């Protein structure tokens, strides 16, 4: 059978300008606590050591982390010296530039189309919004023209299966689910079904767990190994480049959903899950009121894994693609 012509389907939403502006206002509102704290630093009359010390404190309180804060301050001082400015208010704009530059390695769109199906495994701790994010991601994928098959590999929690089933119905996609079955077996069956049914994407929801729960982390590794036993996906070739030089062997994407409210613990989760699974992307949720947001700078500095999406609420449109400059402007508004 002749393979279909390769079609690059970017998951990056092509929202109307008005919708994007509305979403950015929600992001600014969600990060207003951090923005207000940092803004007060620039109300002084001069640029001096006291300003930089106050800024260091504000950045640390925003969960930016010691290493990222130090790098930002070094970059900022260089920009201030290079610009010759003596206006503290102007320093804030230079800080936006420095932060956007630091966050730029995280800005990368999720692209499908190279492999048929593209197999995506999604992990995260309980309460991070993992299953809800999968539902929203499913809608983004189907809106872009991709056919999706869901796998309910969180087999120990009936509520998780039911929730994913609701999303499957809402998005009019098929779901592979078993009551109390082995998560790896469900994942294997889903990938096999995705191949047989000609789906573009297979999205696998795994059970939420803490990285300190070593036996559960081993289960995630098992799921990954078993998925690989389904064999390579159809490589469509063409102009769609493999993810980070990867191969056609699934899973092609391993995503971690993190709660933006958890601060430096989010960085700890990223490191642990990346060490165990080899993450390819992140979805950051709940940047909608109490989140400080600076942890993305810490992630960029210490484990620069692409942030495919960020969420600012429960509605479908509240999940959008990550843009480094937009985020820096929202955080420092």
Image (cartoon, grey):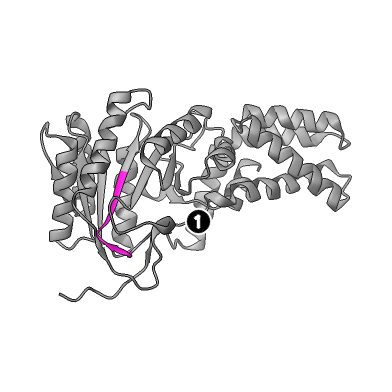
Q: Residue at x 22, y 50 (%)?
A: 170
In the picture, the quarter occupied by the C terminus is top right
Q: Is residue 293 left or right of residue 270?
A: right
Q: From where the camera sits, is residue 314 visible?
A: no
Residue 244's spot in the image, x, y percent? Answer: 43, 56
Q: Is 61 within the magenta?
A: no
Q: Residue at x 87, y 48 (%)?
A: 85
Q: Is residue 38 left or right of residue 263?
A: right
Residue 256's spot in the image, x, y percent? Answer: 39, 40
Q: Is 115 within the magenta?
A: yes
Q: Which residue is mark 1?
A: 20
- Residue range in magenta is 113-121
Residue 21's spot in the image, x, y percent? Answer: 54, 55
In the picture, the quarter occupied by the N terminus is bottom left
Circle 1: element type = helix
Q: From where the camera sits, is residue 51 visible?
A: yes
Q: In front here: 235 or 181?
A: 235
Residue 29's spot in the image, x, y percent? Answer: 55, 40
Specify few, some or many for label 1: CA neighbours under 10 Å numbering under 14, 14-19, or 20 or more.
Answer: some
């Amino acid at each position: 059978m002749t393979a279909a012509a390769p079609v690059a389907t970017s998951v990056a939403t092509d929202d109307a300008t008005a919708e994007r502006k509305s979403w950015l206002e929600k992001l600014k509102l969600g990060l207003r606590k951090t923005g207000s704290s940092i803004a007060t630093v620039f109300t002084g009359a001069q640029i001096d050591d006291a300003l930089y010390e106050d800024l260091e404190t504000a950045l640390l309180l925003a969960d930016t982390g010691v290493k990222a804060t130090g790098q930002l301050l070094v970059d900022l001082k260089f920009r201030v010296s290079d610009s010759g400015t003596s206006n503290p208010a102007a320093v804030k704009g230079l800080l936006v530039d420095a932060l956007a530059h630091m966050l730029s390695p995280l800005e990368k769109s999720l692209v499908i189309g190279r492999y048929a199906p593209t197999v995506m495994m999604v992990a995260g701790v309980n309460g991070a919004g993992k299953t809800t994010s999968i539902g929203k991601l499913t809608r983004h994928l189907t809106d872009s023209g991709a056919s999706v098959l869901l796998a309910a590999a969180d087999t120990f929690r009936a509520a998780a299966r039911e929730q994913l089933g609701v999303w499957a119905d809402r998005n009019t996609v098929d779901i592979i689910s078993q009551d109390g079955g082995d998560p790896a077996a469900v994942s294997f069956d889903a990938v096999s079904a995705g191949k047989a049914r000609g789906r573009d994407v297979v999205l696998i929801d795994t059970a939420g767990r803490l990285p300190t729960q070593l036996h559960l982390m081993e289960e995630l590794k098992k799921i990954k190994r078993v998925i690989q036993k389904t064999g390579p996906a159809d490589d469509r070739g063409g102009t769609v480049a493999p993810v980070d030089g990867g191969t056609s062997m699934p899973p092609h994407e391993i995503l971690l959903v993190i709660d933006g409210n958890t601060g430096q613990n989010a960085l700890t989760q990223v490191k642990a899950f990346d060490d165990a699974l080899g993450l390819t992307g992140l979805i950051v949720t709940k940047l909608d009121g109490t989140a400080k947001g600076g942890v993305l700078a810490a992630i960029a500095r210490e484990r620069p894994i692409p942030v495919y999406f960020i969420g600012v609420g429960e509605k479908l449109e509240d999940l959008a693609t990550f843009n480094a400059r937009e985020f820096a402007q929202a955080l420092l508004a």
